[in-house]
Image (tube, rainbow, N blue to C red):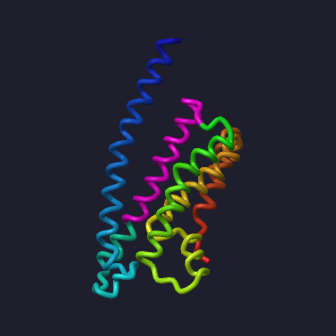
Amino acid sequence: MLKNIKEEIQETAIAIDDLDVLRAFAILLVVLRHCFSPYMGSWPVSAFYDHNIFADITGKYISTISMPLFVFISGFLFSYLRNNLKKYPNFTVLLKKKTARLLRPYFILAPLYIVLFIDFNSTFGFLKQIWEGAGHLWFLLMIFTIFMLFHPLESYFKIKPLKSFVVVLFFSCIPVSRF
């Protein structure tokens, strides 16, 4: 039995080491996607660049891989930490740790980003930018929200994995728009 536990720990360590390769690949994809952005018409600086259909299609394709890959890596690590290392034993601990790691940097950096790089002409405009995820910092809000929604649902997902997969697949196909 002890031998099986050691083998399982060793296999998990190898899997986590492999995440470094995946993370490097995801970072490369995000950088590449941002290289295409000015030519896609998706940034304010796009007014200075000619639209390029190749860049537009390639950038959109890369986006379908890069950010979901980061979410997958985050979810895998969360699952490993929660289930194997017994981190985040309850919702309160998760909330405190993720607030410190994700929301604190967001609420420090987002106002700076908005003041320096985004035009807003009212307090409402400023708060709207904060709510929508200022610039590239949207990822911090998104991943925080996923952690907070997933934690209470995790036990249900373990009991009914197929049903859960279908529900998650359904909701992932619904387009989400900014309001």
Q: What residue is drawn where x is 47% and y is 13%?
A: 3
Principal secondary structure, stretch drawn in magenta: helix
Whether 93 is among the magenta residues is: no
Which one is nearer the viewer's eye here, 26 or 161?
Answer: 26
Q: What residue is drawn where x is 57% and y is 84%?
A: 122
As drawn, 82 above or below 40: above
What is the number of callouts on the image?
0
Whether 64 is among the magenta residues is: yes
As drawn, 21 above or below 48: above
Tell me: 67 left or right of 153: left
Q: Quadrant of residue 56?
A: bottom left
Which one is nearer the viewer's eye here, 105 or 136?
Answer: 105
Q: What residue is drawn where x is 36% and y is 61%?
A: 30
Q: Quadrant of residue 12?
A: top left
**Magenta part of the chain:** 62-87
Residue 151 picture location, percent across and down:
65, 45
| The C terminus lies in quadrant | bottom right
As drawn, 5 above or below 143: above
